[in-house]
Image (tube, rainbow, N blue to C red):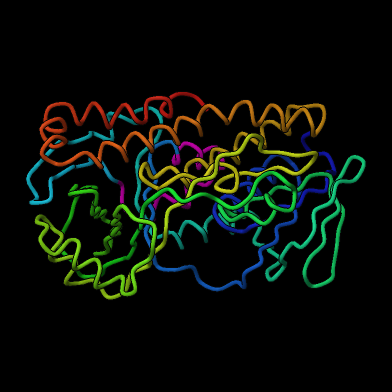
Amino acid sequence: MGGSPLRILVVGAGIAGLAVARALRLAGFRPDVTEKLPPTERADIGLYLPGNAARALRRLDLDGPVRPLGQVIHRQRFLDATGAPLCEVDLDGLWAGVGECRALPRAELHRVLLTGAGGAVRHGAEVSTVDPLPGGVAVGFTDGTSGEYDLVIGADGPRSAVRTLAALGGPPRPAGQVVYRSVVHGGPRVADWTALLGQRAGFLVVPLGAGRLHCYADEAGTSLPADPLARLHELFGDYGGPVPEVLAALETVDVELTTEVELGRWFHGRVLLVGDAAHATAPTLSQGAAMALEDAVVLAESLRAAGSVEAALIAYESRRRPRTRWVRDRTRDRNRTRDVPPALRDPLLRGRGGRIFQEHYRLLTGPL
């Protein structure tokens, strides 16, 4: 169906939605993109992209614009709470032949994707109804406008409105973690992806280039703290390594509860879910953006190759489910490993941690 005049609506202009729009344009389609939020600048948080994300960006012909951004990451270092080494992962070796790992501000990747998608997003357009038609979908918006489409793609995140309106599933379920994110300017010099693992909590620092650090911390829990910055100091004030200097440089922090989305099916009629709307997990493996980018590549390939929309959606879901299931299961595995008491966990990681953590990505180093 490549180059066909399909009327396609992409709901959501985050990483997933813009990547899908870019992939569809490369395949000869001309999707409409809507976003319920106004076109404000994204929060200043960092993003770590493993090698499979770089491969997907190449397939989207966006590796060139991304290459000058952020910093290439060559090694992961795992430390205990005092800052003593546990294990390392050679990222260049792990992702050899796939792509380099990179950390960059999320807003910079978003700008690249927005340009790649053609830059035309209808902001303030919140979907209110999604109704099946013979061979299509009728969509209504909260501003009273409406439209008919051959395919509607819900790329509107873990709390997807499209998912609910199309009867594909309800709200996401809690994954049991409180997550803190910030970008630090003028903190300590950190060369590698560096994680300190404590008692059911962890603190990650990743260089973004230009003297910036992406800081990510989490703890087991299901409620948000009243004062996130104070909670970070309370949790990690006794940690070693770069943590004391990072905490001293922290000014603001974003906090949220992790969620999971696990669905029996990703499409209903001609309504399809992609990215976190279909398969969100806790961010432990840093695969949220990578899975969204891969989704975009595979969806465009499926639509281009299939003889009908229905056949394309079946082919797409059958290709993507094994990889997203792997990410979900390995995410849960890693979270369980971290929750083991340090007295038992740390000797294990010192002996076999590098191999254990590399294994979490084994499937993802293979073909899409």
Q: Tell me where residue 276 appears, x and y as whole percent.
A: 55, 47
Left or right: residue 276 versus residue 225 is: right
Q: Is residue 108 left or right of residue 348?
A: right
Verify whether residue 67 appears in magenta: yes
Q: Nearer the viewer, residue 172 or 115?
A: 172
Q: Does residue 364 lie above or below 197 as drawn?
A: above
- Note whether 362 is above or below 169 in the view shown: above
Number of numbered discs overlaid on the protein picture? 0
Q: Position of residue 58 (x, y in %)?
A: 50, 39
Say left or right for 245 vs 257. Answer: left
Q: Quadrant of the N terminus?
A: top right
Q: Quadrant of residue 143?
A: bottom right
Residue at the image position 26 percent from the left and 67 percent from the top: 184
Q: Is residue 213 magenta?
A: no
The image position of residue 52, as x and y in percent, is 43, 36
336, above or below 30, in the image: above
**Which residue is more in the foreground, 267 or 340?**
340
The residue stretch that appears in magenta? 53-72
- Residue at the farthest front position: 222
Seen at 37% across and 41% down, the residue is 285
Residue 146 or 67: which is nearer the viewer?
Answer: 146
Which residue is outermost to the right? 134
The answer to whether 207 appears left or right of 129 in the picture is: left
Q: Position of residue 328 (x, y in %)?
A: 45, 36
- Residue at 55 percent across and 52 percent down: it is 158
Query: What residue is at 38 percent from the left and 62 percent from the top?
Result: 223
